[in-house]
Image (cartoon, rainbow, N blue to C red):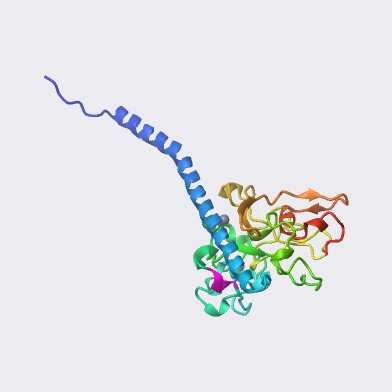
Amino acid sequence: MYRKKAFTLIELLVVIAIIGLLLAIVAPALRLAKERSQFIFCKTNLKSYGLTMKLYLQENDDAYPVSYDSMFSVPTATVPLGCQWHDKRTSPANVPQHAGPLWPYMAKQEASLCPTFKSFAKAFGAEHVGPPENPGRCPNPIEPQYAYSQNHFLGGRVSYPSGTPYGVVKQHEVVDPGGVIEWVEETIWFVPPVNVNRWVLNDTCFFTRHPDDTVGLGDFIATYHGTSLARRNAGKGNAVFVDGHVELCDPYDSITLSSGKVISGGFRLAWPKKGKLSNTKLY
Ligand SMILES: [Zn+2]
Ligand SMILES: [Zn+2]
Protein backbone atom coordinates (compact mmCIF):
# COMPACT_ATOMS: atom_id res chain seq x y z
CA MET A 1 0.00 0.00 0.00
CA TYR A 2 1.30 3.46 -0.96
CA ARG A 3 1.92 5.75 1.97
CA LYS A 4 2.82 9.45 1.48
CA LYS A 5 6.34 9.96 2.80
CA ALA A 6 7.08 13.00 5.00
CA PHE A 7 10.30 14.99 4.65
CA THR A 8 13.17 13.51 6.57
CA LEU A 9 15.30 15.74 8.77
CA ILE A 10 18.15 15.50 6.27
CA GLU A 11 15.94 16.66 3.41
CA LEU A 12 14.70 19.57 5.46
CA LEU A 13 18.27 20.61 6.32
CA VAL A 14 19.24 20.45 2.65
CA VAL A 15 16.30 22.69 1.71
CA ILE A 16 17.25 25.21 4.43
CA ALA A 17 20.88 25.20 3.28
CA ILE A 18 19.85 25.85 -0.32
CA ILE A 19 17.61 28.78 0.72
CA GLY A 20 20.50 30.19 2.77
CA LEU A 21 22.83 29.87 -0.20
CA LEU A 22 20.36 31.63 -2.51
CA LEU A 23 19.99 34.50 -0.02
CA ALA A 24 23.77 34.81 0.23
CA ILE A 25 23.95 35.08 -3.56
CA VAL A 26 21.16 37.66 -3.78
CA ALA A 27 22.19 39.87 -0.81
CA PRO A 28 25.21 41.60 -2.45
CA ALA A 29 23.10 42.27 -5.55
CA LEU A 30 20.40 43.84 -3.37
CA ARG A 31 23.03 45.93 -1.56
CA LEU A 32 24.40 47.12 -4.90
CA ALA A 33 20.90 47.98 -6.14
CA LYS A 34 20.31 49.98 -2.94
CA GLU A 35 23.60 51.91 -3.28
CA ARG A 36 22.80 52.50 -6.94
CA SER A 37 19.40 54.05 -6.15
CA GLN A 38 20.93 56.15 -3.34
CA PHE A 39 23.63 57.30 -5.77
CA ILE A 40 21.01 58.42 -8.31
CA PHE A 41 19.08 60.18 -5.52
CA CYS A 42 22.26 62.09 -4.60
CA LYS A 43 22.94 63.07 -8.23
CA THR A 44 19.37 64.35 -8.54
CA ASN A 45 19.87 66.45 -5.38
CA LEU A 46 23.00 68.02 -6.83
CA LYS A 47 21.25 68.65 -10.13
CA SER A 48 18.66 70.66 -8.11
CA TYR A 49 21.46 72.58 -6.42
CA GLY A 50 22.85 73.50 -9.84
CA LEU A 51 19.42 74.68 -11.04
CA THR A 52 18.87 76.63 -7.83
CA MET A 53 22.16 78.46 -8.37
CA LYS A 54 21.28 79.16 -12.01
CA LEU A 55 18.00 80.79 -10.98
CA TYR A 56 19.78 82.83 -8.33
CA LEU A 57 22.48 84.03 -10.74
CA GLN A 58 19.87 85.11 -13.31
CA GLU A 59 18.33 87.46 -10.76
CA ASN A 60 21.57 88.66 -9.19
CA ASP A 61 23.65 90.00 -12.06
CA ASP A 62 25.51 86.66 -12.47
CA ALA A 63 27.21 87.15 -9.08
CA TYR A 64 27.61 84.13 -6.75
CA PRO A 65 26.56 84.38 -3.11
CA VAL A 66 29.36 84.01 -0.53
CA SER A 67 29.73 80.30 0.23
CA TYR A 68 29.77 80.33 4.05
CA ASP A 69 26.11 81.23 4.43
CA SER A 70 24.59 80.95 0.95
CA MET A 71 22.09 78.25 1.92
CA PHE A 72 21.93 78.64 5.71
CA SER A 73 23.01 81.42 8.02
CA VAL A 74 23.10 80.11 11.56
CA PRO A 75 24.28 82.24 14.48
CA THR A 76 27.06 80.36 16.29
CA ALA A 77 25.28 81.20 19.54
CA THR A 78 22.51 78.84 18.38
CA VAL A 79 24.68 75.96 17.20
CA PRO A 80 28.50 75.87 17.41
CA LEU A 81 30.35 76.22 14.11
CA GLY A 82 31.24 72.69 13.05
CA CYS A 83 27.99 71.19 14.30
CA GLN A 84 25.62 72.94 11.91
CA TRP A 85 25.41 69.97 9.55
CA HIS A 86 24.07 67.62 12.19
CA ASP A 87 21.74 69.76 14.27
CA LYS A 88 18.11 70.16 13.21
CA ARG A 89 18.00 73.60 14.85
CA THR A 90 20.07 74.84 11.87
CA SER A 91 17.63 73.90 9.13
CA PRO A 92 15.66 76.78 7.59
CA ALA A 93 12.90 74.18 7.14
CA ASN A 94 12.54 74.33 10.95
CA VAL A 95 13.87 77.84 11.61
CA PRO A 96 12.96 80.20 8.71
CA GLN A 97 15.20 83.05 9.92
CA HIS A 98 18.24 80.82 9.22
CA ALA A 99 17.55 80.83 5.47
CA GLY A 100 20.42 82.08 3.31
CA PRO A 101 19.97 83.93 -0.01
CA LEU A 102 19.79 80.67 -2.03
CA TRP A 103 17.20 78.91 0.13
CA PRO A 104 14.09 80.58 -1.39
CA TYR A 105 15.22 79.50 -4.87
CA MET A 106 15.25 75.81 -3.95
CA ALA A 107 12.29 73.99 -5.46
CA LYS A 108 12.80 70.89 -3.33
CA GLN A 109 14.24 71.76 0.06
CA GLU A 110 14.65 68.12 1.11
CA ALA A 111 17.32 67.91 -1.63
CA SER A 112 19.98 68.83 0.95
CA LEU A 113 20.48 65.24 2.13
CA CYS A 114 22.23 62.40 0.34
CA PRO A 115 21.00 58.99 1.64
CA THR A 116 24.48 57.47 1.42
CA PHE A 117 25.86 60.39 3.44
CA LYS A 118 23.11 59.86 5.98
CA SER A 119 24.11 56.26 6.74
CA PHE A 120 27.85 57.08 6.90
CA ALA A 121 27.11 60.13 9.07
CA LYS A 122 25.26 57.97 11.56
CA ALA A 123 28.22 55.55 11.70
CA PHE A 124 31.11 58.07 11.81
CA GLY A 125 29.61 61.55 12.29
CA ALA A 126 30.68 61.81 15.92
CA GLU A 127 34.33 61.69 14.78
CA HIS A 128 34.19 65.19 13.34
CA VAL A 129 35.73 67.96 15.41
CA GLY A 130 33.21 69.23 17.92
CA PRO A 131 32.69 72.77 19.16
CA PRO A 132 35.79 74.61 20.47
CA GLU A 133 34.87 73.88 24.06
CA ASN A 134 34.67 70.16 23.19
CA PRO A 135 37.51 69.41 20.76
CA GLY A 136 37.88 65.89 19.46
CA ARG A 137 34.86 63.67 18.99
CA CYS A 138 31.61 65.59 18.80
CA PRO A 139 29.40 65.02 21.84
CA ASN A 140 26.18 66.24 20.20
CA PRO A 141 23.53 63.98 18.63
CA ILE A 142 24.14 63.32 14.93
CA GLU A 143 21.02 64.27 12.99
CA PRO A 144 22.26 64.97 9.44
CA GLN A 145 20.74 68.13 7.90
CA TYR A 146 22.72 68.69 4.70
CA ALA A 147 25.60 67.12 2.83
CA TYR A 148 26.71 69.62 0.20
CA SER A 149 29.09 72.58 0.24
CA GLN A 150 29.56 75.46 -2.19
CA ASN A 151 32.96 75.91 -3.87
CA HIS A 152 34.40 78.87 -1.95
CA PHE A 153 36.28 80.19 -4.99
CA LEU A 154 32.89 81.00 -6.57
CA GLY A 155 31.77 84.15 -4.85
CA GLY A 156 34.88 84.08 -2.66
CA ARG A 157 35.31 87.80 -2.63
CA VAL A 158 37.99 87.67 0.03
CA SER A 159 40.08 84.83 1.37
CA TYR A 160 39.92 83.87 4.95
CA PRO A 161 41.65 85.26 6.96
CA SER A 162 44.10 87.41 4.99
CA GLY A 163 41.65 89.52 2.98
CA THR A 164 43.26 88.73 -0.41
CA PRO A 165 40.78 88.62 -3.31
CA TYR A 166 40.30 84.92 -4.10
CA GLY A 167 38.53 83.11 -6.92
CA VAL A 168 35.81 84.73 -9.05
CA VAL A 169 32.67 86.71 -8.27
CA LYS A 170 30.64 86.12 -11.45
CA GLN A 171 29.87 82.86 -13.22
CA HIS A 172 31.04 84.04 -16.64
CA GLU A 173 34.53 84.56 -15.17
CA VAL A 174 34.96 80.79 -14.73
CA VAL A 175 37.49 79.72 -17.39
CA ASP A 176 36.32 76.08 -17.79
CA PRO A 177 32.67 75.69 -16.60
CA GLY A 178 32.68 71.93 -17.31
CA GLY A 179 35.79 71.40 -15.19
CA VAL A 180 34.99 73.44 -12.07
CA ILE A 181 32.80 72.16 -9.23
CA GLU A 182 30.00 74.34 -7.87
CA TRP A 183 28.52 72.17 -5.06
CA VAL A 184 30.31 69.11 -3.74
CA GLU A 185 30.02 66.43 -1.06
CA GLU A 186 32.55 67.10 1.68
CA THR A 187 34.05 64.56 4.07
CA ILE A 188 32.86 64.52 7.70
CA TRP A 189 35.85 62.64 9.15
CA PHE A 190 39.58 63.27 8.85
CA VAL A 191 41.03 61.44 5.86
CA PRO A 192 44.59 60.36 6.67
CA PRO A 193 47.23 61.66 6.47
CA VAL A 194 46.00 64.85 8.10
CA ASN A 195 47.76 67.70 6.31
CA VAL A 196 46.75 70.16 3.56
CA ASN A 197 43.14 69.76 2.37
CA ARG A 198 42.01 67.20 4.92
CA TRP A 199 39.46 69.28 6.82
CA VAL A 200 35.85 68.22 7.48
CA LEU A 201 32.33 69.56 6.78
CA ASN A 202 31.69 72.44 9.18
CA ASP A 203 29.60 74.95 7.18
CA THR A 204 28.32 75.17 3.57
CA CYS A 205 31.72 76.32 2.31
CA PHE A 206 34.10 74.02 0.41
CA PHE A 207 37.45 75.78 0.73
CA THR A 208 40.48 73.84 -0.47
CA ARG A 209 43.82 75.51 0.03
CA HIS A 210 46.77 75.95 -2.22
CA PRO A 211 49.97 74.47 -0.71
CA ASP A 212 51.38 78.04 -0.59
CA ASP A 213 48.57 79.08 1.72
CA THR A 214 50.12 79.29 5.16
CA VAL A 215 46.82 78.58 6.93
CA GLY A 216 47.22 74.97 5.83
CA LEU A 217 44.15 72.84 6.45
CA GLY A 218 41.57 72.97 3.70
CA ASP A 219 38.43 71.01 2.84
CA PHE A 220 38.39 67.52 1.34
CA ILE A 221 35.92 65.80 -1.02
CA ALA A 222 33.82 62.99 0.52
CA THR A 223 34.94 59.37 0.07
CA TYR A 224 31.70 57.50 0.84
CA HIS A 225 30.21 56.72 -2.60
CA GLY A 226 31.05 53.40 -4.22
CA THR A 227 32.51 51.82 -1.10
CA SER A 228 31.47 50.21 2.20
CA LEU A 229 31.45 51.30 5.84
CA ALA A 230 34.52 49.11 6.37
CA ARG A 231 36.48 50.89 3.60
CA ARG A 232 35.14 54.39 4.07
CA ASN A 233 38.20 56.23 2.68
CA ALA A 234 38.19 54.25 -0.57
CA GLY A 235 35.26 55.89 -2.35
CA LYS A 236 34.48 59.16 -4.11
CA GLY A 237 32.14 62.15 -3.78
CA ASN A 238 29.55 63.67 -6.11
CA ALA A 239 29.62 67.25 -7.38
CA VAL A 240 27.58 69.48 -9.66
CA PHE A 241 29.80 71.51 -11.97
CA VAL A 242 29.38 75.13 -13.11
CA ASP A 243 27.94 73.94 -16.45
CA GLY A 244 25.24 71.97 -14.56
CA HIS A 245 26.46 68.39 -15.09
CA VAL A 246 26.88 66.04 -12.12
CA GLU A 247 29.93 63.80 -11.82
CA LEU A 248 31.62 61.53 -9.30
CA CYS A 249 34.94 63.10 -8.23
CA ASP A 250 38.15 61.46 -7.09
CA PRO A 251 39.52 63.27 -4.00
CA TYR A 252 42.93 61.62 -4.47
CA ASP A 253 43.46 62.80 -8.05
CA SER A 254 46.36 65.08 -7.06
CA ILE A 255 49.25 66.48 -9.08
CA THR A 256 52.78 67.40 -8.01
CA LEU A 257 54.09 70.75 -9.24
CA SER A 258 57.69 71.18 -10.43
CA SER A 259 58.32 72.88 -7.08
CA GLY A 260 57.51 69.55 -5.41
CA LYS A 261 54.30 70.86 -3.90
CA VAL A 262 51.20 68.67 -4.11
CA ILE A 263 47.85 70.02 -5.29
CA SER A 264 44.90 67.90 -4.12
CA GLY A 265 42.13 66.57 -6.36
CA GLY A 266 39.70 68.93 -4.61
CA PHE A 267 41.79 72.02 -5.40
CA ARG A 268 42.21 71.01 -9.04
CA LEU A 269 38.45 70.76 -9.42
CA ALA A 270 37.66 73.90 -7.42
CA TRP A 271 40.08 76.51 -8.78
CA PRO A 272 38.10 78.57 -11.35
CA LYS A 273 41.07 80.29 -13.04
CA LYS A 274 42.57 77.26 -14.73
CA GLY A 275 45.11 79.27 -16.70
CA LYS A 276 46.96 80.34 -13.58
CA LEU A 277 47.14 76.96 -11.87
CA SER A 278 50.52 76.06 -13.30
CA ASN A 279 52.11 79.32 -12.14
CA THR A 280 53.48 79.87 -8.68
CA LYS A 281 51.29 82.95 -8.33
CA LEU A 282 47.63 82.08 -8.01
CA TYR A 283 45.74 85.22 -7.22
ZN1 LIG B 1 25.92 61.55 -2.08
ZN1 LIG C 1 29.32 68.41 16.17
Is 103 magenta? The answer is: yes
* Left or right: residue 41 compared with residue 279: left
- Residue 12 position, x and y percent, is 30, 31
Overall secondary structure of the magenta stretch?
helix
- Residue 102 position, x and y percent, is 59, 72
- Residue 267 position, x and y percent, is 74, 57
Which range of residues does the magenta coloring cover? 102-106
Is 113 magenta? The answer is: no
Residue at the location (84% across, 50% down)? 257
Examine the image and state in which quarter residue 101 appears: bottom right
Q: Nearer the viewer, residue 257 or 117?
A: 257
Q: Where is the C terminus found, in terms of image quarters?
A: bottom right
Residue 147 shows in the view: no
- Total numbered circles: 0
Residue 97 shows in the view: yes
Looking at the image, is 13 positioned above or below residue 246? above
Residue at the location (72% across, 52% down)? 265
* Left or right: residue 88 compared with residue 191: left
Q: Nearer the viewer, residue 199 or 129?
A: 199
* Left or right: residue 12 compared with residue 92: left
Residue at the location (71% across, 64% down)? 172
Q: Nearer the viewer, residue 20 or 160?
A: 160
Examine the image and state in which quarter residue 211 appears: bottom right
* Left or right: residue 20 compared with residue 266: left
Ligand 2 placement by image quarter = bottom right
Looking at the image, is 60 positioned above or below residue 220? below
Looking at the image, is 92 positioned above or below residue 235? below
Q: Where is the N terminus found, in terms of image quarters?
A: top left
Examine the image and state in which quarter residue 206 appears: bottom right
Q: Nearer the viewer, residue 200 or 95?
A: 95
